[in-house]
Structure formats: C-alpha cells, structure tokens
Image: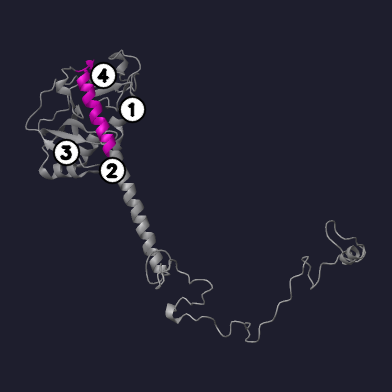
Amino acid sequence: MAVLALWKPHGWVSSFTPKGGHPGLGELVDVPGVRAVGRLDHDSEGLLLLTDDGVLAHRLTDPRFAHPRTYWAQVERVPDEAALAALRRGVDLNDGPTRPARARRLPGEPALPPRTVPIRARQTVPTAWLELELTEGRNRQVRRMTAAVGHPTLRLVRVAVGGLALHALGLAPGAWRALTPAEERALRAGAEERALRAGAEERALRAGAAGARGRGHGAGGEARGGHGAGPGRRPDRHPDGRAGGRPDRGSGQRPDQRPDQRPDRSPDEGRDARGGAAKERPPRPAHGGKGPGARRDRPGRPPRAGRRGPGDEEARRGGR
C-alpha cells in the first residue's frame, strides 16, 4: 500500500478532478488508486497525505482518534494572551464548540516560500503568525476559530500531521514523494496508538455508565422497597440462618416469629376458615366421576371404549 506526501500549493483542490474552476491533484500526482487523507481548501497550503489504505486514512481523520494536525496561520493584528487563551479553551462556532487546541504566537515570520497569489496586505494593519495544533478537522476550522477571536486568517499552511513534519520532507510547493519505510512505520504506529487509546477510553466510559445505571436501579429499588438493600426489602436470610425471604413452608412459622416461638401445631388447624369443624371430604371416585361412585355414562349411550360400565364388574364375577 502506498503512502505519499504532497505539498499542496495554493489554488489547488484536494480532489483529483477540477472543481469550481480550481485544478485538481490529478495534474500533480500520477499514482493510480490513492486518495487524499482529509482535505485542504483551495486557498490553504501545505502537507497533504495520499494513500490507498482505507484503514490508515480512517485512523488519521476520524475525530474520535484525535490525531493532531499542526498549522501556521498568518492573521490580522497581533493576538493578545486573552485571544490565545480562548483558542486553547475552544471556540463556540455555529456548528458547536471546538475542542481545546494548542496555540502560541510565533516569534517572527516562518521560513516559507512566497505564495503564488500574494495575501491582502494593509499598510495600517499589522499581522502575526500563530501555530495551532488541532485534533479535529472541521470545514475551514482554523479560519473560523481565528475570526471568532477577532483575528481573520490571511494565509494558512499545514506543517505537520502527527509526527510527520513538512520541513523534514524536503518538498517544494506542488512536489510529492513516497514516505520512506521508517517514516511510514512511525506514521502507522502513531495512528494505531491513538486508535487503541481511544478504544480503551470508550470502553471505560461505557463501563462507568453501566455501573452508574446499576447504582441508580439499586437506589430506586431501595426507595420503593423493591430491588436493592434497604428497609423495604425482604431480608436475604432469616434469623435462624436459612436463605431466602420466605418462611419455611409447612413449619407454621410466621415471617415475624423467632425460631423459639414456632408452635408445633395449631390447636385450630383442623377447623375451617369460619371457625367450625372441618368438613370431611368424600373419597375421590375410582374412575374420575363427579359423584361418590364411578362415572356413569348418559342413559341411552353405550359405555366409552376402554371404560367399564356400572354392571361390568358384577357380570364378570358371575361369569366365572
């Protein structure tokens, strides 16, 4: 699988086909099957990776993995410490707040080749250069962040992706080359490490949320006298050591009785619920009939197959 590094010049789009009157990468790179990892707007410059490895591209661009990208931005006026602190905390944009970022003011103008289209310069407005490191890649994010703190971006150059720095690649604007095996191994190792770390953090968050739900259910059960330990729950064990919350069936013990208070038998055990003597049940019919004797079939109908009639036993005895 190929991994290429390109210094995308100003005015080119990040797709291989022209778009909006701007030329595409197909005029610069003639390697089939590779695609840009992320994107740079046509008016932005700098390091753009190209690869045909979908897994690597996903790990480098998915915001869950927080793979860092470093930019140099030339902005109008000189940002003070309050503006830099706002960039570090995160800026509220129309699509939500940004993640915290690293932001610092460069001591001077960095060593960059001149842009093909000069920036808009105003003699009365000074400019400054900022270095920003982001872990997400929204549309025109750097430009919107600097504008939100009062310093519009005039020129924007991506100078690093993870530990791969533009100045160490020896490229000029519009030039590209394949990464060396060492550069590619370092890039892949950094992307894999961040992916594994993000996966571990997600699992820890899910485990914590599941534990919080379990504790919430236990607290709710205690309040309702149901699940969870509490005064409203049936005790797990009896005072005599038996497990379970129900009294021993057939012992005559009530749930609130101690073992030494268990009666052997109640003197009224043989009485019915109304206090009188218990009625004696008639013996159960031998053949499942409804009366005290065997079942008799309806008059005029022959006995059922496999069942004996009322006179069958006498006839059988008399026939011996």
- Describe the element under mark 3 as helix, strand or loop: strand
Q: CA distance from mark 1 to mark 4?
A: 15 Å
Lower sequence index among marks 1 and 2: 1
Lower sequence index among marks 1 and 3: 1
Q: Please give the residue where the numbered disc 3 appears in the rendered image.
A: 102
- Describe the element under mark 1 as helix, strand or loop: helix
Q: Which residues are magenta?
A: 173-197
Q: Residues within 10 Å of mark 3 (few under 14, many from 20)?
A: some
Q: Please give the residue where the numbered disc 2 appears in the rendered image.
A: 201
Q: Quadrant of residue 54?
A: top left
- Describe the element under mark 2 as helix, strand or loop: helix
Q: Please give the residue where the numbered disc 1 appears in the rendered image.
A: 55
Tell whether label 3 touches label 1 (CB within 8 Å): no
Of 271 and 5, nearer the camera is 271
Q: Position of residue 63 (x, y in %)?
A: 29, 36
Tell whether label 3 touches label 4 (CB within 8 Å): no
Mark 4 or mark 3, whichever is nearer to me: 4
Q: Position of residue 77 (x, y in %)?
A: 12, 36
Q: Residue at x 38, y 67 (%)?
A: 222
Q: Position of residue 3 (x, y in %)?
A: 27, 20
Q: CA distance from mark 2 to mark 3?
A: 22 Å
Q: CA distance from mark 1 to mark 2?
A: 20 Å
Q: Quadrant of residue 295?
A: bottom right
Please state which amino acid type lies under the numbered disc 2: Glu
